Image: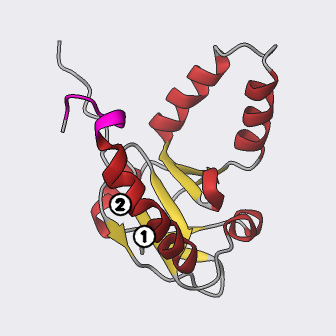
Amino acid sequence: MAREVKPMFLGTHHPRLDDKGRLFLPAKYREELAEGLVITKGQERCLYVFPVEEFKRITEALRTAPVTAKAVRDYSRVFFASASDEVADKQGRITIPQGLRTYAGLDRECVVIGANTRLEIWDAKAWDSYLTDQEQAFADLSEEVLPGVL
């Protein structure tokens, strides 16, 4: 039986947000996202961008989580209430709803990073600050996060 190959998002890209709240998706990911995508709030005030199939997988995982757990309810409410399904236009642009732009502090200069099964959209200054704060921690944690892998 063939294993399903899931998209893997890598790299750092620097698109600009236009006056209508549209952002060009990195060209290398447009094919994987051509069937549609879901944008929602992420941690650290960035936005998560999931291919539809990955978003469905997460939805199923959260569906099986106990609704009696307050953390599950709280996370699900924010995660799904802020979610917006989008399809890129012929130029490869997606519209980021105003509420999500406000949440992530997106103005003009953005950074889109590959984060394995999703993309993340950051305000450029927020990303630079985050990266500066995290790079030493990243170097220090590799053995704890990926024991025996690296």
Residue 148, magenta (yes or no): yes
Residue 123 against residue 73 in the figure, above or below:
below
Q: Are marks 2 and 1 in contact (CB under 8 Å)?
A: yes
Q: Secondary structure at mark 1?
A: loop
Residue at 80%, 33% in the rendered image: 74
38 above or below 134? above
Residue at image position (43%, 70%) is 90
How far across and how far down the image is residue 52, in percent? 50, 41
- Residue 83 locus on image (x, y percent): 68, 48
Q: For mark 2, does the 10 Å Cα neighbourhood hold few (<14), some (14 to 19), or many (20 or more) residues? A: some
Q: Which residues are magenta?
A: 143-149
Q: Tag 1 or tag 2, which sits nearer the N-term?
A: 2
The coloring applied to the image is: secondary structure
Which residue is depicted at the point 46% across and 73% down? 111
Q: Residue 71: where, in percent of width, then height?
A: 76, 28
Residue 113 picture location, percent across and down: 41, 62
Q: Tell me, yes or no, whether the highlighted magenta stretch contains residue 38.
A: no
Quadrant assignment for the N terminus:
top left
Which of the two residues, 53 or 69, is positioned nearer the viewer here?
69
Q: Can residue 89 be seen?
A: no
Q: Which residue is mark 1?
A: 92
Q: CA distance from mark 2 to mark 1?
A: 7 Å
Tell me which amino acid carries mark 2: Arg
Name the residue tied to disc 2: 30
Residue occupying the point 52% across, 66% down? 130
Q: Quadrant of the C terminus?
A: top left
Q: SS at mark 2?
A: helix
